[in-house]
Amino acid sequence: MIPGLVDVHIHGAKGHDFCDANTDGLSDIAAYLYSCGVTSFCATSMTLPENQLMEIFETVSGVPDDGNHAYVAGIHMEGPFLSPAKKGAQKESYLCNPSVDVFCRLLESYSGKIKLITIAPELPGADKFIEKFHDEVAISLGHSTASYEIASKAFAAFSACLEITASS
């Protein structure tokens, strides 16, 4: 027997999607996950405009914390800071370069709820983004065309940030 599973990347289940911006749908997802042994999860968003993301993120606080639903540990933003060449199911017209301003507004509104963000490190502004937000959110490199050198540089930026934090 295991104590419980944690899912850090799930868009939906049972006919519902986190991006439907429907609290009842997200609650159904959480109940289903709990029935499958998942005790907590990060609801994962698609690449969408900022105003839609704000509406979607609002639903996280409506999931019951009653022992019958998986706990919403936070939000995983899958985009919009992704490579168009590796967009997968993301809508290309919503993709953009990493934006400190956009992410600051989202963090202000949903401080403590956004736990993970996926970005492509080769995009202009990615280094600045990593430097600015490494202490506030887990940053995942993905949906990327980054070469080994670019990815290594991004990982080095994480390490440099960690070294600066550790010595402070």
Image (spheres, grey):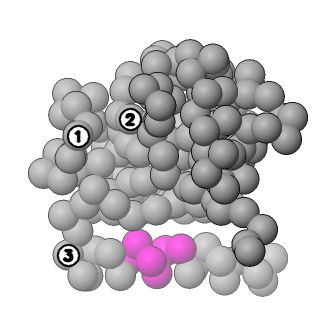
N-terminal-most mark, 2 or 3: 2
Mark 2 in CB contact with mark 1 (< 8 angstroms): yes
Q: What quarter of the picture does the N terminus occupy?
A: bottom right
Residue 41 seen in the current view:
no
Instruction: Name the residue: 56% across, 21% down.
Output: 25
Q: Is residue 78 left or right of 106 when viewed as pictured?
A: left
Q: What is the magenta range?
A: 153-158
Question: Toward which corner of the image does residue 161 lie, by quadrant?
Answer: bottom right
Q: Name the residue under label 3.
A: 147
Q: Name the residue under label 1.
A: 89
Q: Residues within 10 Å of mark 2 (few under 14, many from 20)?
A: some
Q: Mark 2 points at which residue?
A: 46
Residue 121 or residue 35, whichever sits in front: 35
Residue 139 x %, y % = 52, 60
Question: Toward which corner of the image does residue 97 lie, by quadrant?
Answer: top left
Q: What's under tag 3, amino acid-wise?
A: Ser
Instruction: Name the residue: 56% across, 81% down.
Output: 159
Local SS, label 2? loop
> What type of secondary structure mainly makes up the magenta span?
helix
Residue 92 seen in the current view:
yes
